[in-house]
Image (cartoon, helix red, strand yellow):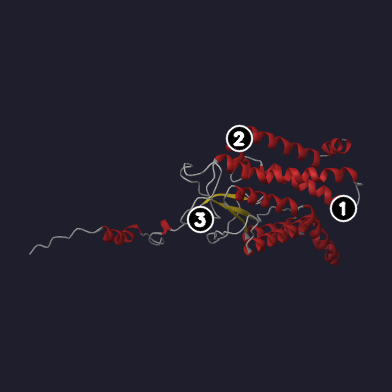
Amino acid sequence: MMKHALPRTLKEEHLLEPTIAMDGNKKPRTDLVEDDPFARSVRPVSHGKARDDGNWRAQTGPRVVQVQFSPFSRGFTQSFRPAPVLHTGSFWHFSKTEISDLAISLAAFSLGLSFMFHGGLLGGMMGMGPSLLTTIPVYFMLGLIAFGPAFIIHELAHKFVAKHYGCWAEFRADPGGLRTGVLIALFIGFLFMAPGAVMVAGNVNRRQNGMISLAGPASNLCLWLLGLPALLLMSSEGILSMAVFYWMVANAILGAFNMLPFGPLDGRKIKAWSEPVFWSFLAIFLGLVYLTIFPSGQAILMGA
């Protein structure tokens, strides 16, 4: 007797699908697993649901629409992070994870700066002997005072402007980037570090996205201007004068670097929102770098 094959139901088709889709190492239906939101940003398909005021809309789960990368962390090696847990706390809310990540990133960044100031192991650091027990802590504190605010305030500026527009925003450290940066500074005396990133989840339009990105460089501009009177009034010698000088160097470099219109840098999102704003801030920071770092620019600055 001929047996007729029964039509498969939709459920049966679904159960058979993984067998067809599987290959050597790929597990069934892995394409449906959400990737680490820290590793990439997901743009909403349409901004039609985004309100102009940026207020939060209810959604079934966190959707990362952008990742604001920290000043030294462009295109670095990412580490796995679980999906963020959206909180309902106040505007000034900091989770324990965020506070811990900020502290670890700042400490690692300052340690890397200390190694950089010593020139690294290849730059004569090994020959300094017991004096390192004194000089490393001194330069560590110099990094905290001079470069720390440029990094921390830059990140918090992204965070609070994003929260102003109704988004969830928290800083997350990148352990791999921190380790790599410290080791590079230790061996060759050059600092290229990936401390981490501010993760932003919510619905924003292009203008709001640009404003969130602009907040970081704008904070560096304010900090540079804050240090200018102190630099002009102080003598050129002493640890305090050195700290003010590096304060201004850090903010000028971070601002200029972030304004580059490439990859995940702030400049790319600012340029997509407003080219006049982008070119204005880029020109400002290039001018600050010239005035702060180059001898001819320093002569103009000190003679002002």
Nearer mark to the viewer, of 1 and 3: 3
- Residue shown at the point (63%, 48%) measured from the top left: 161
- Residue 275 lies, with reference to residue 101, above or below; the image says above
Horizontal side, residue 13 vs residue 25: left or right? left
In space, the residues marked 1 and 3 are separated at their CA atoms by: 45 Å
Indicate the quadrant where residue 239 lies.
bottom right
Pick whichever of labels 1 and 2 is earlier in the sequence: 1
Dot 2, how many residues are within 10 Å of its Cα: few (below 14), some (14-19), or many (20+)?
some
For the residue pair 277 and 15, the one nearer the viewer reads as 277
Indicate the quadrant where residue 291 lies.
top right
Q: Residue furthest top?
A: 276
Secondary element under disc 1, as helix, strand or loop, is helix
In space, the residues marked 1 and 2 are separated at their CA atoms by: 39 Å
Horizontal and vertical percent for residue 284? Answer: 73, 36
Pick whichever of labels 1 and 3 is earlier in the sequence: 3
Give the residue number, with chain letter if any, for mark 2: 274
Q: Is residue 119 visible?
A: no
Q: Amino acid at mark 3?
A: Pro
Dot 3, how many residues are within 10 Å of its Cα: few (below 14), some (14-19), or many (20+)?
some
Q: Is residue 201 visible?
A: yes
Horizontal and vertical percent for residue 177? Answer: 64, 57
Q: Quarter of the image for the N terminus: give it.
A: bottom left
For the residue pair 197 and 292, the one nearer the viewer reads as 197
Secondary element under disc 2, as helix, strand or loop, is loop
Q: Amino acid at mark 2?
A: Ser
Indicate the quadrant where residue 127 lies.
bottom right
Give the residue number, with chain letter if any, for mark 1: 240
Could you say which disc has been placed on residue 62 in the image?
A: 3
